[in-house]
């Protein structure tokens, strides 16, 4: 295949959220696996401070090493996406006097982009903000649009929308930082009415960052403070005693129904919850099992609910819907929806699709091809 017949893919990763390193690990997996005969890859990293930079097309710089993540670092150049043209420019700068950038000295046109693969997790990436930038720039991109990304990122809005759609979710309370400051006792009373134990979470984080399990009222204030460190909006949920089952969903463009993958299960050591360490550091403490072993009719109901959830939130492209499943009562509750789920070759979402017969590089192809077919503008 010739150079010009390959579509140009901008891979964007890193970013300002607490999941920067996870995003880098995902990007490394994709840089290794993506089919270079089909795709001309331009990797762009976003630093923790939000600077956009061109980075080497080298997965070893970004993958996890013995559980330790890597980061995107900036030099004296920055990358920008032009509005209405989907061109990428790299601007070089002088050294400024105080260590900041000085004036621009050169601009290199890195060319047009056909499609963006935003591999960002969490705020400023998975929450509709960067999706809005792509809409403004008139460039196609993989995954959910602005509203679906924003709603799925926010655990309170997700539950509100799903409940309205008649999809089962657990009981919860929203605690904004001003409610907590103005009347903490009213907040404590609302939480007590949920019944302990509870889970206290930032509304818009991920990878379990800022989440605590609280067993008694005495521990509540510390947990709320910790969650408020990450987000002025905090959600408190009644703890659910259930198995953690996840379902991958894919949808091509053009009115196709969402397709669901075989279910996966997160199997945790007794008494543990799926926190940041068990996700990325002490990965021995957790097992990813696919397909999950549950009765056929419950599995089918879960998959059906995952597809309805995808539609209720108006998702596009991909999402992973995470559930609690209570075997004794056969109850199925949506916990959360991830519009850019973990996507390293060892993550649950690719594992589920591998089980369905779609290997990792083919999954990447499918997402990019779907995004190329999707029209620009209001859909
Ligand atoms: N309401 C709940 N009941 C029981 N366990 C919970 C509850 N909420 C969260 N957890 C535990 O905490 C983990 C992280 O919470 P989750 O809502 O999935 O946040 P994140 O977006 O960070 O993945 C879950 O995988 C589960 O182990
Ligand atoms: Mg989760």
Image (cartoon, rainbow, N blue to C red):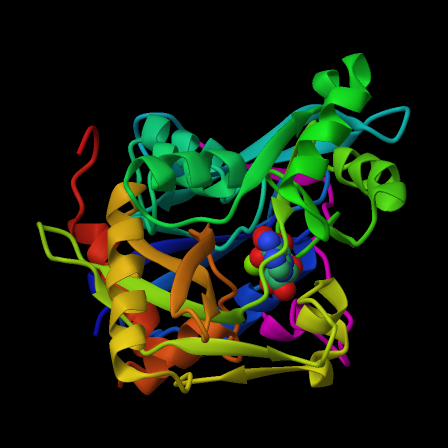
Q: How many marks?
A: 0
Q: Nearer the viewer, residue 181 or 184?
A: 184
Vertical side of 277 occupied by 191: above or below: above
The quadrant of the image that shows the C terminus is top left
Q: Position of residue 295 (x, y in %)?
A: 33, 83
Q: Is 158 left, or right, of 234 in this rendering?
A: left
Q: Position of residue 357 (x, y in %)?
A: 26, 86
* Membership of 9 in magenta stretch: no
Q: Position of residue 316 (x, y in %)?
A: 27, 48
Q: Nearer the viewer, residue 6 or 49?
A: 49
Residue 31 appearing in the image: no
Q: Residue at x 20, y 59 (%)?
A: 258
Seen as rendered, the residue at the extreme top is 182
Q: Position of residue 217 (x, y in %)?
A: 83, 42
Q: Which residues are magenta?
A: 58-81
Vertical side of 222 occupied by 14: above or below: below
Q: Residue at x 73, y 29 (%)?
A: 189
Q: Residue at x 71, y 85 (%)?
A: 284
Could you say which quadrant of the image residue 293 lies in?
bottom left
Could you say which quadrant of the image residue 27 lies in?
bottom right
């Amino acid at each position: 295949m010739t150079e010009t017949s390959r579509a140009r893919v901008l891979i964007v990763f890193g970013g300002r959220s607490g999941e920067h390193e996870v995003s880098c690990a995902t990007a490394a997996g994709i840089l290794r696996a993506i089919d270079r005969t089909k795709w001309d890859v331009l990797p762009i990293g976003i630093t923790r401070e939000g600077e956009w930079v061109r980075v080497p097309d080298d997965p070893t710089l970004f993958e996890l090493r013995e559980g330790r993540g890597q980061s995107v670092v900036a030099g004296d150049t920055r990358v920008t996406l032009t509005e209405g043209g989907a061109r990428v420019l790299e601007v070089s700068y002088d050294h400024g006097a105080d260590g900041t950038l000085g004036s621009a000295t050169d601009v290199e046109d890195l060319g047009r982009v056909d499609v963006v693969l935003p591999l960002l997790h969490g705020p400023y990436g998975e929450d509709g903000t960067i999706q809005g930038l792509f809409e403004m720039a008139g460039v196609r991109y993989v995954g959910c649009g602005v509203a679906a990304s924003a709603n799925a990122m926010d655990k309170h809005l997700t539950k509100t929308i799903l409940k309205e759609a008649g999809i089962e979710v657990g009981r919860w309370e929203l605690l904004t930082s001003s409610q907590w400051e103005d009347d903490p006792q009213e907040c404590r009373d609302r939480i007590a009415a949920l019944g302990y134990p509870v889970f206290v979470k930032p509304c818009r984080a991920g990878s379990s960052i800022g989440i605590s399990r609280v067993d008694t009222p005495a521990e509540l204030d510390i947990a709320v403070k910790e969650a408020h460190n990450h987000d002025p909006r905090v959600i408190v949920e009644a703890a659910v005693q259930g198995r953690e089952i996840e379902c991958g969903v894919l949808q091509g463009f053009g009115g196709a129904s969402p397709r669901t993958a075989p279910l996966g299960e997160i199997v945790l050591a007794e008494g543990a919850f799926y926190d940041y360490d068990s996700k990325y550091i002490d990965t021995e403490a957790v097992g990813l099992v696919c397909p999950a072993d549950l009765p056929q009719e419950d599995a089918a109901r879960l998959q059906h609910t995952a597809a309805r959830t995808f539609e209720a939130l108006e998702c596009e492209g991909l999402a992973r819907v995470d559930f609690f499943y209570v075997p004794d009562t056969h109850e199925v509750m949506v916990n959360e929806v991830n519009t850019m789920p973990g996507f390293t070759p060892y993550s649950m979402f690719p594992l589920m699709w591998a089980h369905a017969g779609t290997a990792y590089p083919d999954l990447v192809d499918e997402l990019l091809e779907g995004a190329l077919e999707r029209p620009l503008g209001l859909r």
